[in-house]
Image (spheres, rainbow, N blue to C red):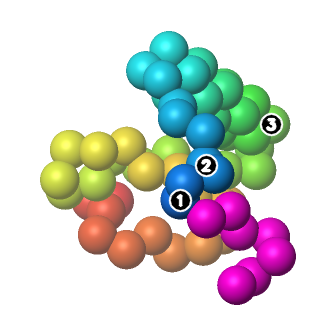
Amino acid sequence: MDPLRFPPAAAPAVGTSLLIFAMGEAMAHLHCLYYRGALVRYSAADGFIRYVRDGVSPQGVDT
């Protein structure tokens, strides 16, 4: 077994509040990078907002 991975029985249960907190943290990092100019934000054809590194051609995005 890979020493960096825990077996499923030893993995802690993640509650809803922790998942919401983690999503908020991830979104805050994306917004920070976007406003610093490191990322570009696109509205994708499926209705989701995608962030890509500036200068990278996004896939599945209406430009």
- Residue that numbered label 1 is attached to: 8
Answer yes or no: do the residues labelled 2 and 1 have beta carbons within 8 Å?
yes
- Residue that numbered label 3 is attached to: 36
Q: CA distance from mark 2 to mark 3?
A: 36 Å
Q: Is residue 4 magenta?
A: yes
Query: Which contiguous range is marked in magenta?
Result: 1-7
Three-letter code for the amino acid on which mark 2 is drawn: Ala
Q: Residue furthest top?
A: 17
Q: Nearer the viewer, residue 4 or 38?
A: 4
Three-letter code for the amino acid on which mark 3 is drawn: Arg
Q: Main secondary structure of the magenta part?
A: loop
Query: Which image quadrant for residue 25?
Result: top right
x then y, percent, for residue 44? 28, 54
Q: Nearer the viewer, residue 50 or 16?
A: 16
Of mark 1 and mark 3, the one earlier in the sequence is: 1
Task: Determine which of the numbered discs, if any, sits on residue 11 in the image.
Answer: 2
Answer yes or no: do the residues labelled 2 and 3 have beta carbons within 8 Å?
no
Three-letter code for the amino acid on which mark 1 is drawn: Pro
x then y, percent, for residue 17? 50, 15
Q: CA distance from mark 2 to mark 1?
A: 5 Å
Q: CA distance from mark 1 to mark 3?
A: 39 Å
